[in-house]
Image (tube, rainbow, N blue to C red):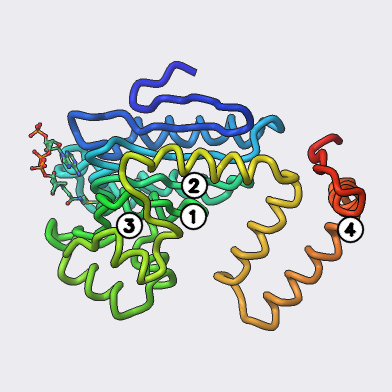
Amino acid sequence: GDYETILLDRSGRVGLITLNRPKALNALNSAVMREVIDAVAGLDADPGIGAIVVTGSEKAFAAGADIKEMADLGFADVHGRETFSGWDALTRARTPIIAAVAGYALGGGCELAMMCDMIIAADTAKFGQPEITLGVIPGMGGSQRLTRAVGKAKAMDLCLTGRQMGADEAERAGLVARVVPAAELLDTAMAAAGTIAGMAKTTAIMAKDAVNAAFETTLAEGVKTERRIFYSTFATDDQTEGMAAFIAKRKPEFNKS
Ligand code: HXC
């Protein structure tokens, strides 16, 4: 499509969405929301795409929701328009999504990264929920996803003081999957996405669903959910192919049907 605030590229079976409002440090206004959601929906519906990377610039993944767009809103505006709830669509995408984060991931930017399935961070990444410094609180899931990711201690610290957390602290705390030198961020994220996209898409969706179940339910229910999904992998051609390929000592050819 013709996007104004993002760039959309493809590399093999990987879709790449680059937030592109450099003058505003990729602040997430309603156009960015509309365009990211539209691009993700298009990639998600494409059987030729097996993984998606969302990234920003060297300086900022995203410095938050667009403060200039929000400043004059009142309760009735945000409540009536369900401002920001459109982002929830991202969490309904079935294709695995990697956030590749360099520089600022603040407020809505941190929340957007946390809506993705995993975060790969440059050593320059800075995560924070500074909403309180503006007289508001996180509104795109930050108080919930950050707490589940890093626990109450650090989530409270970040949400109450507004301080930023560097890449190493974020990795120690369990928010990010990997930290790499900034110059290697995009290559690393694209390579990880390429690896995922080389797996059977059906199975990748099942794996993602199983892990996500851990955040929605009790351990006993989650284990039952996992087992049902595990059994159903045996109904796929990809299970037949994957195991036959292992035994024949050749590479599997997934995604054939
Ligand atoms: C709108 C923003 C912005 C934002 C930066 N800019 N962040 N515009 N919304 N969130 C704009 C600045 O106004 C400035 O525009 C330009 O981007 C460059 O930013 P500077 O501040 O000059 O850059 P720098 O001095 O390097 O400081 C970087 C920064 C700072 C520390 C990241 O920009 C900052 O604190 N930004 C706000 C961070 C924040 O509070 N985010 C949370 C937002 S609330 P001009 O035109 O002056 O050049 C939120 C709510 C989520 O996200 C809840 C959703 C429901």
- Ligand 1 near label 3 (Cβ, under 8 Å)? yes
Percent position of residue 60, x then y: 25, 41
**Would you name the residue on which mark 1 appears?**
118
Percent position of residue 200, x then y: 75, 45
Q: Quadrant of ligand 1?
A: top left
Secondary structure beneath dot 4 equals: loop
Cα–Cα gap, marks 2 and 3: 21 Å
Cα–Cα gap, marks 2 and 4: 27 Å
Cα–Cα gap, marks 3 and 4: 40 Å
Ranked by sequence position, the earlier of labels 2 and 1 is 2
Secondary structure beneath dot 3 equals: loop
- Ligand 1 near label 2 (Cβ, under 8 Å)? no
Q: Nearer the viewer, mark 3 or mark 4?
A: 4
Percent position of residue 208, x then y: 63, 57
Amino acid carrying label 1: it is Met
Establish if 24 lies above or below 201.
above
Ranked by sequence position, the earlier of labels 3 and 1 is 1
Establish if 104 lies above or below 172.
above
| Contact check, label 3 and label 4, Cβ < 8 Å | no
Ranked by sequence position, the earlier of labels 4 and 1 is 1
Amino acid carrying label 3: it is Gly
Ranked by sequence position, the earlier of labels 3 and 4 is 3
Seen at 37% across and 65% down, the residue is 171
**Would you name the residue on which mark 3 appears?**
139
Q: Nearer the viewer, mark 3 or mark 1?
A: 1
Ranked by sequence position, the earlier of labels 2 and 3 is 2
Amino acid carrying label 2: it is Ile
**Would you name the residue on which mark 4 appears?**
234
Q: Residues within 10 Å of mark 1 (few under 14, many from 20)?
A: some
Q: Nearer the viewer, residue 238 or 191?
A: 191
Secondary structure beneath dot 1 equals: strand
